[in-house]
Image (tube, rainbow, N blue to C red):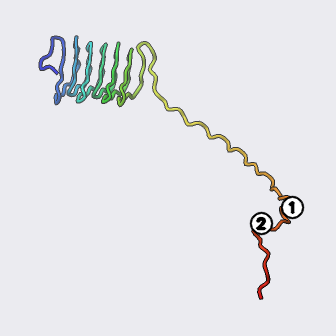
């Protein structure tokens, strides 16, 4: 990351805590902690960064954590280390493997949708057990001696 800010940008460095309402015409990079309201063209929440409050931007990229209200008028990207929670509005959404998205979520111009887990299916009634009637062996099998029966001589 560059050591200098370009005009119209904001950098909240690691270890810095800011609280308040900020309006940034360009890029807002958060590597520290920000609480309040942030409006910018582009917001990048770095791996160590966190934002708690209302975040509004055309483009939002989250590698750290964002909580409360997030409005991404164009793109919302959640990196593999990113966590975003609360009321989320976006136009285009990308969540990388490992990224986390929690709360109510809606596309720009639509009503928020809250995820509700499906209830488990009702247990099916057990199938009846049918037992076959016993089978009797044919008479010729009953009368025949076992094949290994050897005629025995009486002992003297």
Q: Residue at x 26, y 14 (%)?
A: 40
Q: Residues within 10 Å of mark 2 (few under 14, many from 20)?
A: few
In the image, residue 111 sits, relative to residue 140, either above or below, namely: above
Report the disc number at residue 23: none
- 8 sits left or right of 37 in the view: left
Q: Residue at x 32, y 28 (%)?
A: 80
Residue 131: x, y in percent?
Answer: 76, 51
Task: Name the residue nearer the viewer: 135 or 67.
Answer: 135
In the image, residue 15 sits, relative to residue 142, either above or below, namely: above
Q: Which residue is mark 1?
A: 140
Q: Quadrant of the N terminus?
A: top left
Q: How many marks?
A: 2
Residue 110: x, y in percent?
Answer: 45, 15
Which element is circle 1 on? Answer: helix
Task: Give the image quarter of residue 7.
Answer: top left
Residue 105: x, y in percent?
Answer: 41, 22
Q: Quadrant of the C terminus?
A: bottom right
Q: Which residue is mark 2?
A: 147
Could you give the CA–CA distance between mark 2 and mark 1, rounded to whole angstroms? 14 Å
Task: Name the residue nearer the viewer: 98 or 118.
Answer: 98
Residue 92: x, y in percent?
Answer: 38, 16
Q: Residue at x 78, y 78 (%)?
A: 152
Q: Residue at x 73, y 46 (%)?
A: 128
Q: Residue lying farthest bottom? A: 156
- 41 sits left or right of 107 in the view: left
Which dot, 2 or 1, sits closer to the camera? 2
Q: Residues within 10 Å of mark 1 (few under 14, many from 20)?
A: few
Pointer 2 or 1: first along the chain: 1
Task: Give the image quarter of residue 54.
Answer: top left
Task: Name the residue nearer the viewer: 120 or 134.
Answer: 134
Which element is circle 2 on? Answer: loop
């Amino acid at each position: 990351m560059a050591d200098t800010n370009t005009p119209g940008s904001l950098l909240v460095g690691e270890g810095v805590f800011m609280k308040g309402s900020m309006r940034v015409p360009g890029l807002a990079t958060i590597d520290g902690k920000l609480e309040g309201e942030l409006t910018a063209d582009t917001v990048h929440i770095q791996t160590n960064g966190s934002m708690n409050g209302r975040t509004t931007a055309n483009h939002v990229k989250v590698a750290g954590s964002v909580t409360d209200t997030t409005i991404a008028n164009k793109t919302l990207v959640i990196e593999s280390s990113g966590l975003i929670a609360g009321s989320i509005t976006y136009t285009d959404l990308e969540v990388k493997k490992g990224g986390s998205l929690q709360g109510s979520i809606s596309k720009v111009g639509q009503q928020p949708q809250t995820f509700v887990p499906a209830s488990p299916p009702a247990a099916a009634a057990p199938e009846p057990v049918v037992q076959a009637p016993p089978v009797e062996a044919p008479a010729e099998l009953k009368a025949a001696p076992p094949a290994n029966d050897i005629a025995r001589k009486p002992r003297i």
